[in-house]
């Protein structure tokens, strides 16, 4: 199973950020990305933000 990730550098925002987050499931990744966005960037947890974040999910290339 390929891990998924989101890279904050790819997301449009006011604060430059180099954090990348990865997880095995979309649900885990979404919760971690939401927590980061709300805590660090001051975003509000809305259905729109959740949808936007999901669009930024990418699959990691296999290490093998």
Image (tube, grey):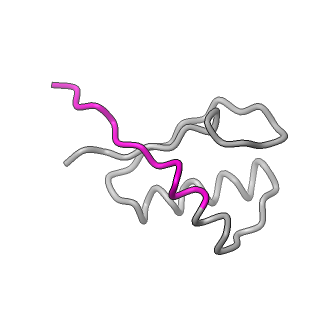
Which residue sits at x=25%, y=44%? 2
**Total label count?**
0
The residue furthest bottom is 47
Quarter containing the C terminus: top left
Which residue appears at 39% of the width and 50% of the height? Answer: 23
Point out residue 40 in the picture as x, y percentages from the top left corner.
Answer: 76, 48
For the record, the magenta segment spans: 52-64
Q: How far across and down, in percent of the image, does residue 14 sit? A: 84, 40
Q: Is residue 52 left or right of residue 25?
A: right
* Residue 62 falls inside the magenta stretch: yes
**Residue 63 percent location from the top left of the image:** 22, 26
Q: Is residue 22 left or right of residue 32?
A: left
Classify residue 46 as left or right of residue 30: right
Query: Which residue is drawn at the image coordinates 51% and 43% (left, top)?
Result: 6
Inspect the magenta stretch and tell me whether residue 58 lies in it: yes
Residue at the limit of the structure toward the left, as seen here? 64
Question: Toward the viewer: 32 or 6?
Answer: 6
Residue found at x 52% / y 54%: 55
Q: Position of residue 54 (x, y in %)?
A: 51, 58
On screen, 45 above or below 32?
Answer: below
Q: Residue 15, relative to residue 49: is it above or below?
A: above
Q: Residue furthest top?
A: 64
Vertical position of residue 18 compared to residue 7: above or below: above
């Amino acid at each position: 199973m390929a891990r998924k990730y989101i890279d904050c550098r790819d997301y449009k925002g006011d604060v430059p950020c180099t954090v990348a987050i990865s997880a095995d499931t979309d649900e885990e990744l979404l919760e971690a990305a939401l927590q980061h966005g709300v805590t660090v960037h001051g975003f509000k947890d809305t259905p729109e933000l959740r949808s936007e974040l999901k669009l930024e999910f990418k699959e990691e290339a296999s290490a093998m």
